[in-house]
Image: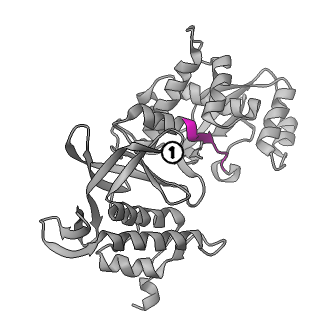
Amino acid sequence: MSHEDNIIKGNVGEWSEIYTLLKLLGEGKVYAGDQNLEKIKDLVYPIIMIIRQEKEGIYDYKVASADIVIQKSDGTELLRLSAETFLNEAEALLSAINEKPAGERSFPVARTQAFMDKIYCSTLKAGSSDKTDIRIILHDQRTKINNEMGFSIKSQLGGDSTLLNASGATNFTYLVDGYDFSDEEIEQINAIDTRTKIIDRIERIWQKGGTLVFCQVENSTFRNNLAMLDGDLAATLAQLLVEQFRTGKRTFEGLVPALAETNPLGYDVDDIEALYRYKLKHVLTSAALGMMPSKPWKGRYDANGGYLVVKKDGEILCYHFYDKNRFEDFLFNNAYLERGKTHRHGYASLYRGDDGKVYFKLNLQIRLK
């Protein structure tokens, strides 16, 4: 095997996972963040240990005063290095990420790879399932208990991170009601190929007197996952997708007033906004910690610790699931709808169903700003 075969390449998100490992070990603690991505100075979690599953086995990275002790899972010590060394390597990696070659999604970082080899870290992503990117034993100063928890890492170093990925599984199907479109009119609308073609196609449907009436989530697995969370979630999200085109807004925070005004579920309560806000927070939390559209979900959170957010300046903030309200507020305040590629997921075109009626699909993708 040549030397080039051994070179590790990764994207910004993957290198951010290694940066998180090095930075947390170097600092020996992580601060909680508020809903505005600001550090809460009086809420800090000391780090006891970080656990990584590598191809060769499980390795423990133990914080021991000013040193980091790397050991096997049976406690056999393999290496001891100063915490300062880890901090220096983290800073070097941060610089490399920020200075990555323009236009290259995947790139090597030779210095970091050499250090990874030294500390028994052979892969960019630790062996894990689903949403868990890193396993940490934290000390909770309020309960005085050490807990091992899985966290999902979201990095802002490479732009906005995805909370729920677009795919064919996230298509929502609507009946086009109120106007009987001819085949020629369907072709004319589908031929609209402007930069804002989704908006323009929907506006043309509305101009003709057509309305989008939600039918179902196309994928049965995603449909069942949403039903497990809340029987009304599919209809809520379907209306949210429509409201982004009606209002021109894309943030969850900005769309809730429109959702409350339309009130697709017909609730008769004093504070309708609070009700829809709660439902949306529920789906955001579930998507963040375990639920995936195309995998049957049993309601268990994989990343049971919460989120670690790598900010643009390299600071890492912890959104601990114990602080559920703060965690949900962070997700809700930063979530927005992204429009995926129509050619990849087959949506935003009119089509005639087997029943002769005309249908339209919209696609759900959620990012964090």
345 relative to 305 in the view: left or right:
right
Determine the residue positioned at 33% across, 43% down. 304
Determine the residue positioned at 72% across, 28% down. 357
Residue 354 seen by the camera: no
Way the structure is coloured:
one colour
Please provide percent x and percent y for residue 110.
46, 82
Quadrant hosting residue 225: top left
Determine the residue positioned at 57% across, 9% down. 270
Secondary element at tag 1: loop
The residue under label 1 is which amino acid type?
Answer: Glu
Q: Check the image and report above or below for 16 versus 92.
A: above
Magenta segment: 333-340
366 relative to 30 in the view: left or right:
right
- Tag 1 residue: 38
Quarter of the picture containing the N terminus is bottom left
**In-front residue for pair 254/48:** 48
Q: Check the image and report above or below for 205 versus 6.
A: above
Q: Residues within 10 Å of mark 1 (few under 14, many from 20)?
A: few
**In-front residue for pair 28/187:** 28
**In-front residue for pair 284/172:** 284
Q: Check the image and report above or below for 206 versus 262.
A: below
215 relative to 199 in the view: left or right:
left
Magenta-drawn stretch contains 45: no
Determine the residue positioned at 36% across, 76% down. 116
Please provide percent x and percent y for residue 243.
70, 29
Please provide percent x and percent y for residue 246.
76, 30
Q: Residue furthest bottom?
A: 2
